[in-house]
Amino acid sequence: MEVTIQKVVLAAITDDLSKVSGVPAFLAKDDASRQTKAMYLSRILQGAVHDLGDGVLIVVKH
Amino acid sequence: MEYGGAIGLGLLAGILARVLMLRSDYRQYPTYPHGYSTHLFMGIFAALAGAVTIPALLENEWTAVTFFLLVAEQFRSIRGMERDSLKALEDNELVPRGTEYIENIARVFETRYYIVIVVAAATALGATKQSPLMGVILGAVVFMWGAVLTRVETIGETVEVRAAPVVVRGSDVWVGDIHIFSVGLKESQEFIRERALGAILTPKNDEGRDTLASQGQRQAMLHDAASILGVRRDVDSPEFAPQTKRDIRTGRVAVYVVPMDRDEGLLLEMLRRAPVLESARGRARFMRLGYSGKRNPRAGRKRIGGNHPEGGLGSDHR
């Protein structure tokens, strides 16, 4: 049986690192670069990207 | 060979019953040649066991009972066999069947063998006691009876299935007025806006409401729908995985899919024809207690508490 981690925030992409703590966070000042980074991360980690608003995107494994 | 004819006829009737029940549609999986042959051969054994029993008992061969129990035990393992093989496939399904659906399919397969045994026995009994024609009639009656007993209810009988628009507002995806989830990627939002399909399932009565509450049932519906319409996803794009969400105020359920084949009519038809799983069948029909507390106990089973699309909790809602 394969063991997977679920319902876990794997990474965050934010415009200000002080908004995130405890998970790997990536700084991206503008919206376009946040989107690109989030897309790469979601494909790499096989997770879904959710928008928390206020310039924070998270990648979550479901 | 006094009973040769009766055994032969019983065997034939049993095999015929198995072949008739081997029809494959989108709900069952053995579309593969090997799955088919396995069940055909097992069917022959079941038919033989059933057909031989009657003459043996008529000859006062009571040991036959022992052997018959042994055979029944063998066929009980069919359920395990089906469960194991479906579970083995489950990990790599893009839209899994879910354990409840697997359990349901396995149970169906097991039951079919018992029907085969009984059909073969009934045919042999008729042929021994009267004439081959009587055997055929008896076998047919038992087969029909089995078919009636194992008739599967469909979702459409207790639930109203309607199309609903998939709306992407900001990062939120909605089907009609039910929120599904939030998608952060702009690219995915655009993709969903263009290609997703939605449906809203409204329970017609308390049974429908209970059925829709079951997570296994909802997963089974998604699997059925996805197996015909296809899914536009891969392992690395979970946001395109089909989903259901329950509106907890009303008990309605929203279905969200991003299909390969964007055919709304087909989606609705698939959802309506999805089998109601035994484990998910509404229990309301077996409960008289719940009705006595209502203001009007005679309101009947069709009564829906707060299930109205616009309504919140109705005063009658349990």
Image: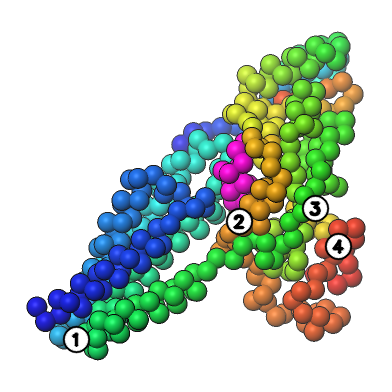
**Looking at the image, is mark 2 or mark 4 earlier in the sequence?**
2
The residue that appears at 80% across and 23% down in the rendered structure is B186
Q: CA distance from mark 1 to mark 2?
A: 44 Å
Say which element carries label 4: loop
The answer to whether marks 2 and 3 sit on the same chain is yes
Separation of disc 2 and disc 3 at Cα? 20 Å
Task: Give the residue pinned by disc 4.
Answer: B308
Dot 3 corresponds to which residue? Answer: B247
| Pointers 2 and 4 within a single chain | yes
Question: Which numbered dot is residue B124?
Answer: none
Looking at the image, is mark 2 or mark 3 earlier in the sequence?
A: 3
Pick whichever of labels 1 and 2 is earlier in the sequence.
1
Q: Residue at x 72, y 19 (%)?
A: A39
Q: Judge from the rendering whether residue B120 lies leftward or rightward of residue B55; answer left or right.
A: right
Residue hosting label 1: B58
Q: Which residue is label 2 attached to?
A: B274
Labels 4 and 3 share a subunit? yes
Q: Which residues are magenta?
A: B218-231
Tell me the amino acid under the disc marked 2.
Ala
Q: CA distance from mark 2 to mark 4?
A: 23 Å
